[in-house]
């Protein structure tokens, strides 16, 4: 299969999987399956940061949350430890599903394994593709979900919010930081203040 056809096959299969999400997100007035909408946000931000991204990075970004609704957070216990167990389990599942799709589209085994590794984030900070995926994911969170998350978690104290912002910031590269600061100008005032306070003490 020609390279362009393989890429189209992989992205179409990932989109088909994510379109099965029963949850909905409204984007520009249109109701979309939530994880399909998320994958489009990831693709948009990838191309904003990388004018000519590799196939593996395009696929990894599109598959970042593939079928995540099948592994709900509520299946794991409360608290930070269980949250990280859930995140790691999701990463392994996303990597496995992406690798299966790539194999079915004719990608060689080493490329399937490479994308799986990116999605599990086992080599974050050591691997440029994994780090770029993390930049993109952080920017999608800040742009699309941070304000709603902040409103939903009104019981969190200020110190907890500062830790969340600093952890998010600490996972990003300087290029990601630059894009995030540009985003911050359009955030609600309370989130701008939170970001400024977190970064002034980081």
Image: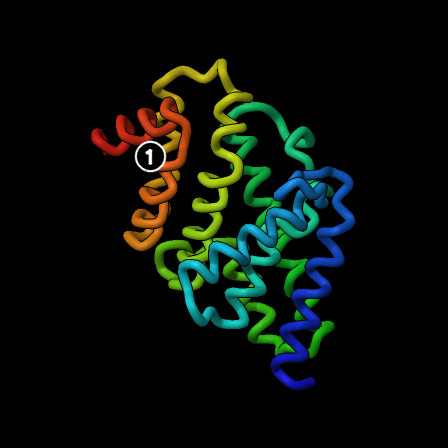
Q: How is the image coloured?
A: rainbow
> Picture coordinates of residue 61 (x, y %)?
54, 58
Most foreground residue, 109 or 138: 138
Asked if residue 17 lies left or right of residue 108, the reply is right
The x and y percentages for residue 105 are: 71, 74
Figure quadrant of the C terminus: top left
In the image, residue 103 above or below residue 185: below
**Mark 1 neighbour density, 10 Å: few (under 14) some (14–19) many (20 or more):** some
Tell how many labels. 1
Residue drawn at x 67%, y 72% as measured from the top left:
8
The front one of 51 and 98 is 51
Residue in the picture at 67% in, 68% down? 10
Residue farthest toward the front in the current orientation of the protein = 29
Up-down: is 23 above or below 13? Answer: above
Residue 110 as seen in the image, left or right of residue 194:
right
Please report the residue visible at 52 percent of the width from the left and 28 percent of the height from the top. 149
Residue that extends furthest to the left in the rendered view of this protein: 200
- Is 81 or 28 nearer to us in this picture? 28
For the N terminus, the quadrant is bottom right
Vertical relation: 142 (above or below) 74: below
* Mark 1, residue position: 166
Q: Quadrant of residue 13?
A: bottom right
Q: What residue sits 69% from the left and 43% below the top? A: 30
Q: Position of residue 115 (x, y in %)?
A: 55, 65
Pinpoint residue 194: horizontal percent, then vertical percent.
33, 26
- Under circle 1, the secondary element is helix
82 relative to 124 in the view: left or right: right
């Amino acid at each position: 299969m020609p390279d362009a056809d393989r890429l189209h096959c992989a992205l179409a299969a990932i989109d088909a999987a994510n379109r099965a999400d029963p949850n909905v997100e409204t984007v520009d007035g249109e109701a979309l399956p939530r994880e399909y909408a998320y994958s489009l946000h990831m693709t948009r931000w990838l191309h904003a940061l990388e004018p000519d991204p590799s196939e593996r990075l395009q696929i990894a970004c599109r598959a970042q949350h593939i079928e995540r609704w099948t592994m709900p957070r509520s299946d794991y216990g409360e608290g930070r430890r269980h949250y990280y167990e859930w995140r790691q389990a999701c990463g392994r599942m996303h990597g496995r599903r992406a690798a299966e799709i790539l194999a079915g589209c004719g990608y060689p085994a080493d490329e399937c394994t490479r994308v799986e590794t990116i999605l599990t984030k086992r080599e974050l900070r050591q691997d440029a593709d994994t780090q770029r995926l993390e930049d993109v994911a952080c920017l999608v969170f800040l742009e699309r979900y941070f304000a709603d998350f902040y409103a939903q978690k009104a019981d969190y104290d200020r110190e907890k919010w500062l830790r969340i912002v600093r952890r998010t910031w600490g996972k990003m590269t300087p290029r990601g930081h630059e894009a995030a600061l540009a985003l911050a100008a359009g955030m609600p005032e309370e989130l701008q203040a939170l970001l400024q306070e977190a970064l002034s003490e980081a």
